[in-house]
Image (spheres, rainbow, N blue to C red):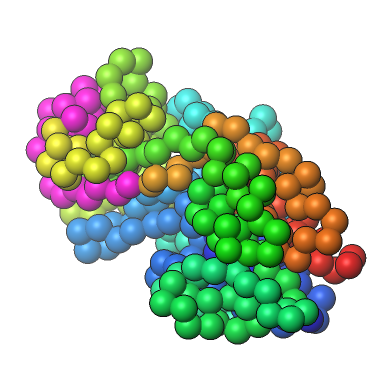
């Protein structure tokens, strides 16, 4: 059986691993150059490692992701135990908060090892081709024919693909209605002693939270510590298309209120934008993927909750549906 998985985030990688382990031929197609979706990391100002997507991975000890972590990615694993407030929408009671000294991409890269992953490839259409499904690029070039396709893109992007897939119009309308919060993030290197806390939520101002990367063994470089400041949803939406200068003008004074005057003139900054950062509502995966559908939707739009564990479970659900067919 040949399966195309669209999206190399955690849901797509779980689905692909399960299917390959069961002996099937799988190709993972990812529009960006990196893996892991929101489990994204950047290097800034030389050797500074900064996680600018998911700040920490909550892993229930008996959960799905725990097995992947233990089997594939323990060599530079860090359990974040610094005091501080839970990152909004991320924490699970009793679940370890995990990160990697090399960045959050460590786990998805390990999960992708041995898989056929094609990056920098934007899928634009899924069409019927006899008994098979043809996957095509936006220029119309075919990327092959498959027995099944698993789509793990955010709701609106998945809807665009279902618009062109067999019997996908109604499902596309449902996906397009899934609401997302945008997120604009400021990565900043500040010449301060790293605080004891890992996550801090200012009581007022435009910032939703600040994370201290030193708590994840992303240690200061030449006395400059790394921080990630996430603007709240309303401010992020307002600044999504704004210049980096406008974003910094909003974020840095607020960062200085929490970290001190040095944050008003950081050693370095980067601005990152997530148009589909977090879902406010989600669809039921079983209802959205009726019996007989060979284009299956997984990912955050159909997850049971906001955690990465919930998103990963949608990839396993899709794999099982295929394996049980």
Locate residue 117, reporting x and y percent.
55, 77
Q: Which residues are magenta?
A: 250-273
The residue under the point 78% across, 61% down is: 293
The N terminus sits in image quarter: bottom right
- In the depicted structure, whether residue 73 falls above or below residue 301: below
Locate residue 71, reporting x and y percent.
69, 66
Single out the residue that lies furthest toward the right: 324
Q: Is residue 136 left or right of residue 289?
A: left
Q: Quadrant of residue 114?
A: bottom right
The residue under the point 20% across, 59% down is: 45
- In the depicted structure, whether residue 247 falls above or below residue 254: below
Q: Is residue 233 left or right of residue 143?
A: left
Locate residue 61, reporting x and y percent.
73, 45
The residue under the point 68% across, 33% down is: 94
The residue under the point 54% across, 44% down is: 176
Single out the residue that lies furthest toward the left: 265
Please say whether residue 252 is one of the residues in the magenta stretch: yes
Locate residue 211, reporting x and y percent.
38, 37
Residue situated in front as seen by the camera: 145 or 21 = 145
Residue situated in front as seen by the camera: 13 or 136 = 136
Residue situated in front as seen by the camera: 141 or 9 = 141
The C terminus sits in image quarter: bottom right
Please say whether residue 89 is one of the residues in the magenta stretch: no
Q: Quadrant of residue 254?
A: top left
Q: Quadrant of residue 245?
A: top left
Q: Is residue 201 left or right of residue 317?
A: left
Residue 112 in view of the camera: no
């Amino acid at each position: 059986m040949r399966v195309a998985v669209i999206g190399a985030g955690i849901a797509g990688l779980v689905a692909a691993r399960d299917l390959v382990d069961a002996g099937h031929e799988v190709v993972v197609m990812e529009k960006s150059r990196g893996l892991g979706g929101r489990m994204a990391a950047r290097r800034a100002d030389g050797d500074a490692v900064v996680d600018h997507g998911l700040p920490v991975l909550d892993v229930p000890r008996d959960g799905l992701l725990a097995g992947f972590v233990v089997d594939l990615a323990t060599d530079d694993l860090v359990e974040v135990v610094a005091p501080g407030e839970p990152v909004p929408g991320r924490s699970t009671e009793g679940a370890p908060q995990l990160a990697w000294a090399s960045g959050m991409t460590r786990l998805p890269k390990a999960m992708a090892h041995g898989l056929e992953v094609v990056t920098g490839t934007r899928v634009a259409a899924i069409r019927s081709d006899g008994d098979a499904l043809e996957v095509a690029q936006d220029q119309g070039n075919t990327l092959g024919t498959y027995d099944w396709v698993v789509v793990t893109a955010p709701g609106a992007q998945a809807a665009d693909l279902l618009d062109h897939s067999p019997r996908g119009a109604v499902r596309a309308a449902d996906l397009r209605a899934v609401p997302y919060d945008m997120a604009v993030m400021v990565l900043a290197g500040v010449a301060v002693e790293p605080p004891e806390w890992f996550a801090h939520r200012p009581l007022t101002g435009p910032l939703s939270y600040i994370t201290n990367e030193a708590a994840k063994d992303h240690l200061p470089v030449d006395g400059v510590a790394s921080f990630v400041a996430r603007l709240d949803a309303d401010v992020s939406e307002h600044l999504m298309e704004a210049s980096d200068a406008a974003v910094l003008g909003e974020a840095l004074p607020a960062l200085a209120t929490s970290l001190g005057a040095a944050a008003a003139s950081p050693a370095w900054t980067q601005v990152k934008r997530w148009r589909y950062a977090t879902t406010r509502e989600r669809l039921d995966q079983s209802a959205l993927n009726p019996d007989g559908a060979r284009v299956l939707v997984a990912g955050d739009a159909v997850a049971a909750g906001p955690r990465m564990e919930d998103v990963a479970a949608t990839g396993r659900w899709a794999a099982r549906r295929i394996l049980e067919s």
